[in-house]
Image (cartoon, rainbow, N blue to C red):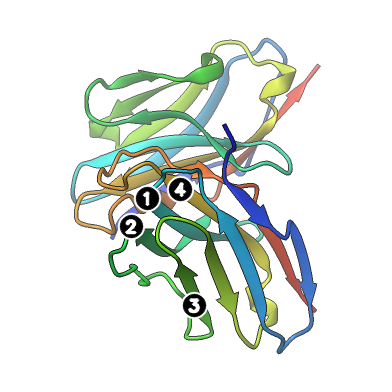
Amino acid sequence: GAGVSQSPSNKVTEKGKDVELRCDPISGHTALYWYRQRLGQGLEFLIYFQGNSAPDKSGLPSDRFSAERTGESVSTLTIQRTQQEDSAVYLCASSLEGRGFADTQYFGPGTRLTVL
Amino acid sequence: AQSVTQLGSHVSVSEGALVLLRCNYSSSVPPYLFWYVQYPNQGLQLLLKYTSAATLVKGINGFEAEFKKSETSFHLTKPSAHMSDAAEYFCASSYRGSTLGRLYFGRGTQLTVWP
């Protein structure tokens, strides 16, 4: 079956512009995660959605970052007034239930964001 | 605080040689531990995971890892490297009490395999 897909694969924007990144999880997966991977660093957790529960936004670095998810489907990550330090690869992952700490997360290929 | 440290950002081995990628964790509670592999322009793929059932975990592509509580380590090994193993490898952990399923990642180790 189809894996996690993300779009666009690459995004170049100017400082101060807003960007929207999209994630399509695996069908039937109720849990969805966003991570950020900056050059030379590991992945940083951003936000977590589980079904219709309130999302865990504890990893969002600033109020310029927001994310939405409609039910158990597509999620969008929005970065307002982008800054150069926002340049990174943004990865989305989904898991079947998100009820277990050992659930396998399936990752998309990522969106590479470059802020000029 | 929970964290994962990968020793060595780059590892090079010859084809057929032993692969050893190091990972140490820091946690006040028992962790769940994972190794993921990332091929160029692809998403992360799970190699194996430790969930406390057995300390020696076997994964895909001939990789295995051993959980050693006394050393707080979860090193990844493969007896004989193949050219197709060249990729970036990430060690990660999750913990009870944190965001459900949230993964804490190391910085990654780039594995190069020489012919």
Q: Nearer the viewer, mark 1 or mark 4?
A: 1
Mark 4 and 2 residues: CB-CB less than 8 Å, in contact? no
CA distance separating discs 1 and 3: 19 Å
> Is residue A95 toward the left or the right of residue B41 in the image?
left
Say what amino acid the circle numbered 3 marks: Ser
CA distance separating discs 3 and 2: 16 Å
Quarter of image, res B67:
top left
Quarter of image, res A85:
bottom right
Q: Residue B4, percent across and down?
A: 40, 48
Q: Chain letter for mark 2, please.
A: A
Give a yes or no on whether discs 4 and 2 share a subunit.
yes
What residue do we see at 73% from left, 24% from top?
B113
Q: Residue A10, percent across and down?
A: 76, 61
Q: Nearer the viewer, mark 1 or mark 3?
A: 1
CA distance separating discs 1 and 2: 6 Å
Look at mark 2 in the image and give the residue it sits on. A50
Q: Chain letter for mark 3, please.
A: A
